[in-house]
Image (cartoon, rainbow, N blue to C red):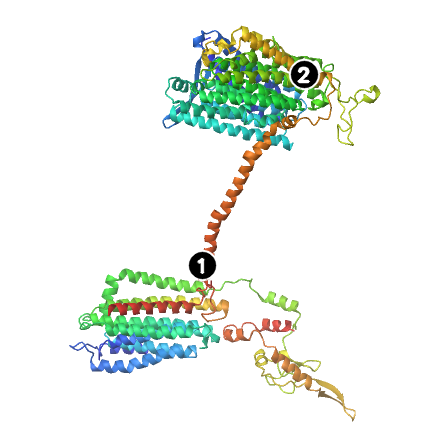
Amino acid sequence: MNPTNYLVLASVLFTLGAMTVLLRRNAVIAFMGVELMLNASNLALVHLSRHHGDLQGQVLAFFVMVVAAAEVVVGLAIIVAIFKTRRSASVDDADLLKG
Amino acid sequence: MPDVEALAPALVAVPLAAAALLLVLGRAADRWGHWLAVLASWAAFVVGAVLALDLLGRPAEERVVDVTVGRWFDAGSLAVDAGIRLDPLSITFVLLVTFVGSLIHVYSVAYMAHDRDRRRFFAYLNLFVAAMLLLVLADSYLLLFVGWEGVGLASYLLIGFWNHRTPYAVAGKKAFVANRVGDIGLLVAMGLLLAHVGALDFASVDAAARSGALSEGTLTAVGLMLLLAACGKSAQFPLQSWLGDAMAGPTPVSALIHAATMVTAGVYLVVRSASVFDGAPTAQLVVVVVGAITLVFGAVVGCAKDDLKKALAASTMSQIGYMMLAAGLGPVGYAYAIFHLVTHGFFKAGMFLGAGSVMHAMDDEVDMRRFGGLARLLPVTAVTFGLGWLAILGVPPFAGFFSKDGIIEAAFVPVEGAPWRAWVFGLVALLGAGVTAFYMSRLFFMTFAGRRRWSDGHDEGRGTAPAPAGAHPVGTPAPVHHPHEAPLLMVVPMVVLAIGSAVLGLVLATRGFTTWLEPVTGHAEHEEPVLPVPVIIAATLVVVAAGLALAALRYARDEVPVVPPVGTALTRAARVDLYQDAVNDAALVEPGTHLTRTLVFADRAAVDGAAVGVGALTVRAGTAARRAQTGLVRSYAATTLLGVVVLGGVVLALGS
Amino acid sequence: MSAALDAAVLAPAVVMSLTESGRTTTGEAVLFWVIAPITVVAAFGLLFARKAVHAALSVVLVMISLAFLYVAQDAVFLGVVQVVVYTGAVMMLFLFVLMLVGVDASDSLVETIRGQRWIGWLAGIGLGVVLVSVVGRATWATPVGLAEANADSNPVGVARLVFGQHVFAFEVVGALLVTAALGALVLTHAERLTPRRGQRERAVARVRAGGPLTPLPAPGVYARSNAMDVPALGPDGRPLEQSVSRVLRVRGQAADSPGTLVPTTRPDGTVTLAPAGSAGDAGRRREVEARPDPTVGRDAAEAGSDAASDAASDAAAEGVRP
């Protein structure tokens, strides 16, 4: 099998994650789309790490995971806070930045 | 007395300190403040007298003493010392200002007795004395300018002293503005001198002008600018309009500032700048023309005015026109200009004080048509006023005869290359003497002679000269007056000034006053007028007698109508000061207003419009761009992703 | 946990390596072709799932599959971390928040932003095309493989880099995690805006409101049936709607009122209680149904959190309501 297939898989997953962000209104689901995109990039990093025979890619993926964990904590806290004030988990309802 | 010059700064400092003290202490000094001011003024006179005696004790060539007070400021290459120049000219002015000023201080103590702001009045008077002394004592144009502005300030404050009455406040403002126009001239002249001479002290300027280091064009420009300044301060044509309104101030102010001293500062400036004018014949000619025009102008206006003080103001203007004319004639005229200035200071101040006395007696009435027959009730005033009247007429041997006659003779002295000038200016001066005689006699007769045209409340019983119908608005009774002679404090200064009017001319003429001034004015070779001197004197006396006789016929023998007759076109014009305010309005105020309005419009339309337009454009652009900001996260994400796709597509397309 | 253990135990056993030609081994190819479709399908599940919980489970599936692929590519450590951190911690957090937030109209797939759906599909497909094109067009050197780098086992190799070259970044990330935890605390902290209401305050408010001071009657008291959905009867014989659970009333599941029993004189002279005409009662029922309780939506959302908080204050509020 051509190892490049891993990258194609990563591309497909990344695209699906991005579409989830664009198309789903539930903030939690959109957030999961973001996580999916991060995972897809991690897959690409891991594959390229093997391709180059260098562990730096894995280290980078590791850091991505840690930062993603922090991001999830804060992001979900924000979602909860918004929900408490607006009684809604829809990203479309939070449009205070409307010009 | 080797160090007596060191006293000179005290001349300015003492009145200035008194003024500051009175203003700072405020109401606390109300009870004794006026006496402090009188004391300060007399102290200045004493110092001036001591200095004058010291100067008289020196040989003629040592009579110019410069006293340096200290370094005033350094500005790059320009270093200015504050210094005092004591010479015959300045000491003459010092004596005039302090003596007449002190007399008027004394007079004012009684005249302003019932004014609750008397202390403030005296503070301003002292401020004026200090500024005037600084003006005449300064040894440079810059320091002179300080005094020049100081007297302008004091004049403004005193004209508007009763500023709770709007017309008076407006009159003060008018004087201030007209003076500012003149001040521009002095500033420009100083700038020119600074550029071409590099110094502003009289010694340097004199040296540069006499050595020929300055071109005639420069001297002419400086001279004309100095003349502009003099016109503003001395109410000369075309800046004469403020003097009549300045009579709004208390009468002692009119006597001191607007008759005897401040308004003559212009003449002082021209004489002080003799070296400049001597090198600029064109500027001299303009000075003479301005003097002649003002002389006639003031005389014509004086003939028509019914307001006692305004008639005197017109006379002042006319007399200063004489001085200006003389000052423009060059060395032949300088001495006579100053001579006339001194005698005029005495007799005009005396007459103003007499006018104040009349107003005091008549409850501040100033309309001469409501006077008449006051000589019997105010004998001292009538006599002192009469002496001043004879002096201004030039009746020998009173003061005006010596000074004015000298000017007329000087005017007849031929000028090389322009023989017409002697005749024109000589005849103008001669004619002016006649007109002066007419209007001053008219003023005197209307006030003191003839039958009384006022009511003392017993008219019906005695049946004499009831107030004619129409003299007062229907329904208001004619004001009732009980004229009485002024208190002693007012009478004494009048008497002193009247004595001066009577004998000062004779004294000074015989003691060689003109020679005394030569260290400043330069020596003038005696030149023969185009007419023999006895002829000129005779002609002058004849013209004066004619004017006097005409006035006597019309105003002493005939009944003076209380309601002014319509009069000729010239009379009507003269009553409104020959339309000077209308001309000013049309020539300056209206165009200025239009210019300002145009500028404001242009500012609003162009400048503001541009600014507001840019702002409005920004707002509109912002409103348009705002629509892109939906606040919806998913729209933003879609935009971002589309951007990524487009960028990736571009990279792909370029990379293939 | 078990998945992580399995991966850790299996890792040394299934060390994958590339062939000399740079292609994968057959075993890896089989693993890939089994797992990749599952992953893609699960990702589509995230995109299309109607219920948020289903979406979350799909993501869990994707992440576990990815853990397998990491292990297959000689990234044993990352495979374990993937399971522990993502599947074990992050996705559990997601599920927890989903329970907290509940389900609402935003789960619907109906688009509300005009054009967003078209733009989303266009951008998504465009992105996929671009990414795949990049991968396809790239020129690849012969893969190196991690046999050499993983000589001392993969975790040791990663640890050398993390605690060597990247130790500063590691510390910073640690600080970031602490900060994130604090940030979450701050963000979710509820500020008390009104003074705390104790027993006294509640009692005072209740008296002031003028409602019934005594406990409400239990359903079915004096009624013909003592079932949960039958209102009790008051002293006047009228049914007390309040005695039935609020939830039942809102749902319209309260039983038909037994009607008002009024004293009736029979022809034989005895007096009995008989229900009055039932028309009025039917009207009352409709009235109750036609007036939806404004707190219904909130109640659904708050289910579990504060439903049992204070029945007393709810009852007081009921008493105030006309």
Residue B239, image x, y percentages:
54, 27
Mark 1 nearby-residue class (10 Å; few <14, some 14–19, many ≥20): few
Q: Amino acid at mark 1?
A: Ala
Name the chain letter of the residue that bears numbered label 2.
Answer: B
Specify the amino acid type for callout 2.
Leu
Q: Could you say where residue B623 lies in the image, as x and y percent from the top left?
A: 47, 60
Give the numbered dot on residue C105.
Answer: none
Q: Which residue is mark 1?
A: B621
Q: Residue at x 40, y 67 (%)?
A: B636
Horizontal side of residue C142 vs B527, given as left or right: left
Q: Quadrant of the C terminus of chain B?
A: bottom left
Q: CA distance from mark 2 to mark 1?
A: 84 Å
Q: Position of residue B247 (x, y in %)?
A: 62, 25
Q: Would residue B485 be visible to someone looking at this image?
A: no
Along the line of sight, which residue is nearer the eye, C232 or B593?
A: B593
- Residue B550, labelled with which disc? 2
B211 lies above or below B170: above
Q: At numbered mark 2, what does the secondary structure look like: helix, strand or loop?
A: helix
Residue farthest toward the left in the current orientation of the protein: C20
Determine the residue positioned at 63% across, 16% down: B437
The subunit carrying tag 1 is: B
In this orientation, does residue B409 appear?
yes
Answer above or below: position of C266 versus B633: below
Q: With B490 as the anchor, is B414 left or right in this view?
A: left
